[in-house]
Image: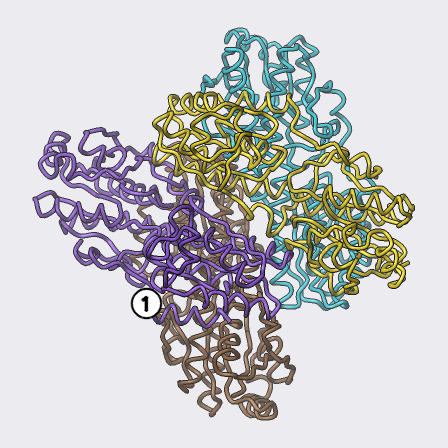
Chain colours: A purple, B brown, C yellow, D cyan
Amino acid sequence: MKIGILTSGGDAPGLNAVIRGIVFTGLQVYGHEFVGFLNGWKGLVDDTTIPLTRHQIMGISKQGGTILGTSRTNPFEHGGAERVKTVLERNGIDALIAIGGEGTLAAAKRLTDAGVRIVGVPKTVDNDLSATDYTFGFDTAVQIATEAMDRLRTTGDSHGRCMIAEVMGRHVGWIALHSGMAAGAHCILIPEQKTSIEQITEWVTSAHDRGRAPLVVVAEGFALDTMTDVHSERGLDAFGRPRLGGIGEHLAPLIEERTGIETRATTLGHIQRGGTPSAYDRVLATRLGMAALRTVLEEHWGCMVALRGTEIVHVPFEDALGKLKTVPQDRYDEARVLFG
Amino acid sequence: MKIGILTSGGDAPGLNAVIRGIVFTGLQVYGHEFVGFLNGWKGLVDDTTIPLTRHQIMGISKQGGTILGTSRTNPFEHGGAERVKTVLERNGIDALIAIGGEGTLAAAKRLTDAGVRIVGVPKTVDNDLSATDYTFGFDTAVQIATEAMDRLRTTGDSHGRCMIAEVMGRHVGWIALHSGMAAGAHCILIPEQKTSIEQITEWVTSAHDRGRAPLVVVAEGFALDTMTDVHSERGLDAFGRPRLGGIGEHLAPLIEERTGIETRATTLGHIQRGGTPSAYDRVLATRLGMAALRTVLEEHWGCMVALRGTEIVHVPFEDALGKLKTVPQDRYDEARVLFG
Amino acid sequence: MKIGILTSGGDAPGLNAVIRGIVFTGLQVYGHEFVGFLNGWKGLVDDTTIPLTRHQIMGISKQGGTILGTSRTNPFEHGGAERVKTVLERNGIDALIAIGGEGTLAAAKRLTDAGVRIVGVPKTVDNDLSATDYTFGFDTAVQIATEAMDRLRTTGDSHGRCMIAEVMGRHVGWIALHSGMAAGAHCILIPEQKTSIEQITEWVTSAHDRGRAPLVVVAEGFALDTMTDVHSERGLDAFGRPRLGGIGEHLAPLIEERTGIETRATTLGHIQRGGTPSAYDRVLATRLGMAALRTVLEEHWGCMVALRGTEIVHVPFEDALGKLKTVPQDRYDEARVLFG
Amino acid sequence: MKIGILTSGGDAPGLNAVIRGIVFTGLQVYGHEFVGFLNGWKGLVDDTTIPLTRHQIMGISKQGGTILGTSRTNPFEHGGAERVKTVLERNGIDALIAIGGEGTLAAAKRLTDAGVRIVGVPKTVDNDLSATDYTFGFDTAVQIATEAMDRLRTTGDSHGRCMIAEVMGRHVGWIALHSGMAAGAHCILIPEQKTSIEQITEWVTSAHDRGRAPLVVVAEGFALDTMTDVHSERGLDAFGRPRLGGIGEHLAPLIEERTGIETRATTLGHIQRGGTPSAYDRVLATRLGMAALRTVLEEHWGCMVALRGTEIVHVPFEDALGKLKTVPQDRYDEARVLFG
C-alpha cells in the first residue's frame, strides 16, 4: 500500500510527530510506502513530492514546524478533485492523509465526496475544532504564553504597572482562557465575551487596589462591546477591533487613561506556534498519527481522528466542520471568578 | 461556612493551585472561612492550623510543593475518626477537603463512613488512580522526564552509547510510557510488562544496528521477567528487582555485557515532582480545586473530584480505590510499535 | 552600621539577587542593619522605607523584578542632595547602595560630590555600561531572545517565510548581537551599524537562495541608513526610525515587497526583562551585591562594582558614565561573517 | 587550504557551535576545505572521515553533542605522531583543529612537538582548565543544575526534608559553586575543600533551625575530611570517597542519622552535559571556533584559543596543561558566607 501525506495551513508544534507516528508504524508493521507532498495542497496539485523513508523521520517528533512544509493553498482553486485524483493516480497512491485545520478538512470532505480515499488529522493551535477534546499544538501554545506571563508579572510588580499580554485566538479564547487561568490573570478577554472598557477598568482597578500589578490577557480576536468615540479616535472599527496593530496595544492607552495606572502591552505572536512541542503535544500527535494510519487500514474514508477523554477515535469530517468550538459560558464563568 | 484543607502524601506540582482554586472561590464568591492543617493528617490529629486568607494564596499557583506542608501520617494510627471529629469540632469546621493519593482517599472514605463531612481531591504524580483521566503533577513529571531524555540523547549519539533513563512509577508505567513516546525511546520498560533481558537486548541491538544511540526508559518499579544467576549476582531479588540502588543502574551492566555497547544510566528522581507546574497542571489543579468547593456546597460527602474528558465531575471514593490504574495492553502495544 | 538600599530604573532579572547578596552578608557576617527605600529614588525623597530582614530576603534570588519596587524618579527634581541627606540622617543611615542604570549612577555621582556616602551597582539589561564586562539581566535577556528565535525559526522553515525578531537595545546592539549569533540569524541589525534596505534585502535573498528561511534580528534602536520616499510613506522619520510601532513591524513589508518572500515580525518586548534570572545572572548579581557591601566597608564612596574577567572590582562612577558601551566594529564584523 | 577537525573526550554543549564557527567562516570567507575525523582521535588514527560542507553544519549550533562523534582514544596508544602525520598527509590536510579537554590538549602538544600543525579548542564542562576564564558547556551545566535544585527545593520545603543534589565535578567544584550560589544552597561541598561530617551537620541543622529545608550541593569528587568507622561501614574508602554509588547517596544517611532530618539525594548525572546549549555557550563556542580558524591562518601552531574577559586570545598549550583550575579560597569563602 502507498500512502500520501500532506500538512496544510499554519504550522503547529506536533506536526512532525504526527508524520512520524504514521510513517514509522506503516513502515515497521505493515511495510507500507509513503510519499510526502510538499507545502500542503500546493504540493499535491503541483505534484511535488518526496519519499518518506525511515531516515527522514528519524528524531523529528521533537522538532517544531513540519518537514513537509505548508501553505494555505486551496486545491479547489487549482484543479479540484480531478487534479487531485490525477496526481494521486500518477504517483500510484492508494490513500491520502491530510493534516490541517478547518479549511483543509473542508477540502478533504469535498474530495471524499468526489471519491478520493482520504483521512484527516485535525490541526489547530487555537483548539477551535469541534469533535475533538484537544488538538496538538494547543498545549505548547498555552505553556509558552503562561511562561511569558510569569515573566511579565515580575515587571508589572516592580513598576506597579498593568501588563497586557495579547495571545493567539482569532475566533475563540481557549489559549487566553487556559494561559490566563494558569498565570493568575486578573482579567481574561476572549472573542466569545464582548466586554466593555468600563468593566475591564473595574477589574484592573480592583486588582490594583488589592496591591497587585494587574495582569490582563487578551485573545487577538477580542472586541470591545461597543464602539465609542474614544475607540474611533484610537482606530477601532465599528466592531470594536483595532484597524491597525493588535488589540493589546489599543487597550493599553484606554486602560491607562481611565485608571491612571501605567499600562504596557506585549504581543506574543509567532513564538506561540513554533519550536519544540511539549511532551503532551508529542504524545497526542504521535497517537493521532498512528490512529490515522489505522483509520486508513480500516478504510474509514471521510473521517478524521479525534481525542475523546484518553482515547483516540475517528469521526466523520462533517462532525468537525461548521461548528467552531468556542469557550462555553460555564468555562468562562469559572475563570471569571478568579478575576477577583 | 468554615472549611478545613489538608495536603497529604508525596508532593506534586499543582497542590498550591488546588488550594488557591478552593480558597479564592470560597472567599470571593461565598464568603467562606478557611483553615489549613499543617503537614497532612498530622496537622489534623495534632490540631496545628493556619488561617488561609487571600494574602496567603496570592501568586501560589505557579509554586511547586504545598504551602501547607505534607506528611505520610495515617490518621487511623493517631486517634482515628474520634480524634478527627474532635479537632474539626474544636475549630468549628463544617467540612474538610483532603488532597492526597490513594492512602489519603482510603482514610477519607473511612472517615466519611464515620460521619465526617469530607470531600477529596486526587493527587498522584504517577497517574495511577482510577476514576480520573489524569491527575495534576503527571503532566509536569512527563515534561521534565522528556526534556531530560532529549538531553541524554545527544550524549548517547555523540559517544555511540546506550542511555538508560529511570523515571518514577513504582507500580504503574504511565510516566515511562508518555515520556518514552515523547522522547522517541527505543524501549520502554514498565511494571505492567515483565520483560526478559534478552528482549531488551534485542531492542537495544536493533536500534544500534540502525545507527541510533539506543534510549531505554525504565519505570522505577519495573522488574525483569525471571531471576537468573546473573541477576542474583548483580543483587536482584527473586522478583527481578534490584536489592540496592535503582533498576536503571542494574540494567546498565547487563545490557553492556550482552550487547558490547557502552551503557550509562541516569536516575531522574525527585526533580520529576518538584518545581513550577506546567500550564496544563495549573489549569487542571485550579479547576479541581474549584470543583471540590462546589462538591462541598452540594454536600456530596464521600466523593472526590475527577477529570473526565474536558469536564470535572465528582465520583464516590470507592470508585477510585482498590483499582490501580495500570497501563492497558493496547496502550503498551501502541508504544511498542515505536521501539523499532 | 545601618545601610540603605534602593533599586531604580527599568527592572532587570537579578535585582533581588543583588539585594540578597548585600543583606545576607551584612546581617550574617557584620551584624549590619538594612533599610530598603521603596520604588527607587522616589522612596528616598518621600522617605518610604521597609526594614530588610533575613525573612524578607529568603528565597528571593530566583525571583525576577525587585522586592523594593522601582521608578524613574530623579532625586534632583525632588529636593536633590539636601533632601537625600535629610532623609538618610532621619533614618540614621550611614551609607547608601544604589542599584541602577546610567541615570542612577549619574545622580549617585552628584550626591557623592555633595558628600553623601554612596556606592553603586550597575544595572542595564542592554549591557551598555562601560567599565564592566557584563551587567546582570543581559544573559537572561539573550537567553529568552534566543529561545524565542529558535521557535520562530521552525515557523519560518515550514512556511518558507522570512522571520524578523525585534529585541531590546535602544542605543546599543548587544542583545541582538549575542542572541542573533546564538540563534544563527542571517542578518543582525544594530543601532551602531546603519544599514540600507538594499543590503538587508541582499542578505535575506541570499539565505533564501541557499534554501534557508531567513531570520533577521533587529535591535529596537536600529535605523535604516537613509530616508527614502518609501520609508516616509511607511511612517519612518528622517532618521529612518518608525514613527509608530516598532522597527521590526516596519521592516517586514519593506523586505517582503523587495524580495517577494512572505515576511513576519515579532516584537519580543517586555518578556526579555522579567522573570526568573538565568543561573549566570544570579551568580553575577549575588557577587556584585557582596562586593558592593565590601566597597561600603572599605569606604570607597563614589564607586560602583564591576565585572572584569572573573573578578569583581570597584571603579569610580565617572569611569562608567558618559561612555555608552557600544558594539565595537570587530565584534560586528565577526558576527557579520555568519550572515552568509 | 584543507583543514581537519576532531572532537575528543566527553561531550559538552557547544561542540557543534565550535564546528560551525570554524567551518562556516572558512568556507564563506576563505574558501577552505574541511574534513571531519569521526569519534575523536580514533577517526584520525583509523582514517575515518566525512567532508564538512555547508549543508552539514546547517542549524547545528543549537544541537547538543557533536556531529563528529567522540571517544576517549589516545593517539599515542595507536601509532602516535607518525600515524597521525601519515593520515593527515594521505588526506592532504594542512592543519588540524582538535577540540577537547586536558588529555586532548596534552596529545596535541606532543604532536605539535613532533611537527604536526595543530591548534586546540579547550573543552571541559567542569571548567577546570587554566588559561581560559570559562569553557563552553559549563554555563549550560550550571543552568541545568540550578533549575534542578529550584525543583528539589519545593519538595524539601513541603516535606521538611534535607535535599542533596550531586553535580558534576570530579576534581574541581566550579559547577557546585555556581549552581549552589544560584540556587541558594545552605552548604556547598567541593573537592578543593575537605569538610567534616560534623561541619556539614552543623550547616544543615542551622538552616533547619531557621525554618528552611536544607539544600546541600555536592560535587561528585568531594571527599569527607577523615575516614571514620561509620564511613567505613557505609563503604567509604580511606580518602572519604564512596566505594560504590555516588557521594550524594552516601551522605544522605550520614546526615539523616546525625540531624534526625529526613534526607534525600539526587544525582543529576548525564543530563548536565547533553542537550541544547545555553545562549551563552553558543556565543562563546562560536567565537572560539572562529578564533581557532584565525589562529590557524596566523600559524600559531601549538596554541589553543581562550576566553580572557570579553576577548578571545590564543595561548600555548603548556599554559593550560598541568595546572588544574581549582576553586580558589576567596571564591569559596565568598560562597560560604551564604551558607548561613
Residue D178 coordinates in the image, percent (x, y): 70, 45
Residue D206 coordinates in the image, percent (x, y): 79, 64
Residue A259 coordinates in the image, percent (x, y): 55, 63
Q: Amino acid at mark 1?
A: Pro
Residue A75 coordinates in the image, percent (x, y): 17, 38
Q: Is residue D81 above or below residue B33?
A: above
Quadrant location, the C terminus of chain B? top left
Horizontal placement of C73 versus D116: left or right?
right
State the count of labels.
1
Q: Is residue C54 above or below residue B113?
A: above
Residue D294: image quadrant is top right
Answer yes or no: is residue A229 visible.
yes
Callout 1 secondary element: loop
Residue B201: image quadrant is top left
* Viewer-proximal residue among A11 and B322: A11
Number of residues whose C-alpha sits closer than 10 Å to that of mark 1, classed few (under 14), some (14–19) or many (20 or more): few
Horizontal placement of A16 versus C190: left or right?
left
Q: Is residue A249 above or below residue C202?
A: below
Residue that carries the numbered disc 1 in the rendered image: A328
The chain containing the residue under callout 1 comes to A
Horizontal placement of C148 versus D324: left or right?
left
Q: What residue lies at 85% left-to-right and 48% top-to-bottom?
A: C118
Answer yes or no: is residue B159 visible.
no
Q: What residue lies at 47% left-to-right and 84% top-to-bottom?
A: B118
Horizontal placement of C321 versus B153: left or right?
right
* Viewer-proximal residue among D301 and A194: A194
